[in-house]
Amino acid sequence: MPIAKCLSVSQPFADLIIMGKKTIELRKWNTRFRGEFLIHSPVAIKSDDCKRLGIDESGLRTGAIIGKAVIYDVKIYKTKKELQADKKYHFASDESYRKYGFLLKNAKAFKVPIPYKGKLGFFDIRLDDTIVRDEDITSDLFDEEYRTQWINHH
């Protein structure tokens, strides 16, 4: 079974990433990891951020892997002013200060979330650890676009 990197991102930020709106994920820690990773949405929702951003929490998927993205670089913020200048890319509140911004691209939502319990930091998951057992479905995690095209043509 393949192993994939995964990162837990609280809602509503996980949805903003998989919709391609949030292209910088802020963290207090740096990473050398570059490449595609799965996005896990923990059970807890940041209600204050939902209200601040005008997002209805009832439609947010939690407790599951809900999509994927690519981290291609890390931006180091030296001042709050620099962080504020990128607000339209990270959506963080003014009072939060995170030094590292993971630069993201090629985000994609999965049509069917995969129930999974998250962990801190980037973590490895073996796809056979998920409750998804069908080989065709698990392989589609890495090629859902092909699957969607195939389904739409049959």
Image (tube, grey):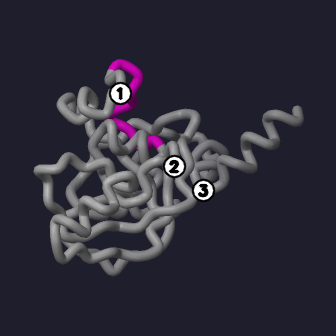
Q: Which residues are magenta?
A: 58-66
Q: Position of residue 31 (x, y in %)?
A: 29, 75
Label ID, residue 55: 1
Q: Residue furthest top?
A: 58
How far is mark 3 from mark 2, CA to CA?
Answer: 18 Å
Q: Can residue 64 be found in the magenta stretch?
A: yes
Residue type marked 1? Ile
Could you tell me which quadrant the C terminus lies in?
top right
Disc 3 crowd rating (10 Å Cα; few below 14, some 14-19, many 20+) is some
Determine whether 50 is above or below 138 in the image: above
Label ID, residue 142: 3
Label ID, residue 20: 2
Residue type marked 3? Phe
Identified at 35% across, 63% down, the residue is 124
Determine whether 107 is above or below 110 in the image: below
Residue 44 placement: quadrant: top left
Identified at 11% across, 50% down, the residue is 95
How far is mark 2 from mark 1, CA to CA?
Answer: 15 Å
Label 3: element kind: loop
Q: Residue furthest left?
A: 95
Q: Are marks 3 and 1 in contact (CB under 8 Å)?
A: no
99 vs 13, left or right, is left
Label 2: element kind: loop
Q: Nearer the viewer, residue 69 or 125?
A: 69
Identified at 32% across, 75% down, the residue is 75
Label 1: element kind: loop
150 vs 114, left or right, is right
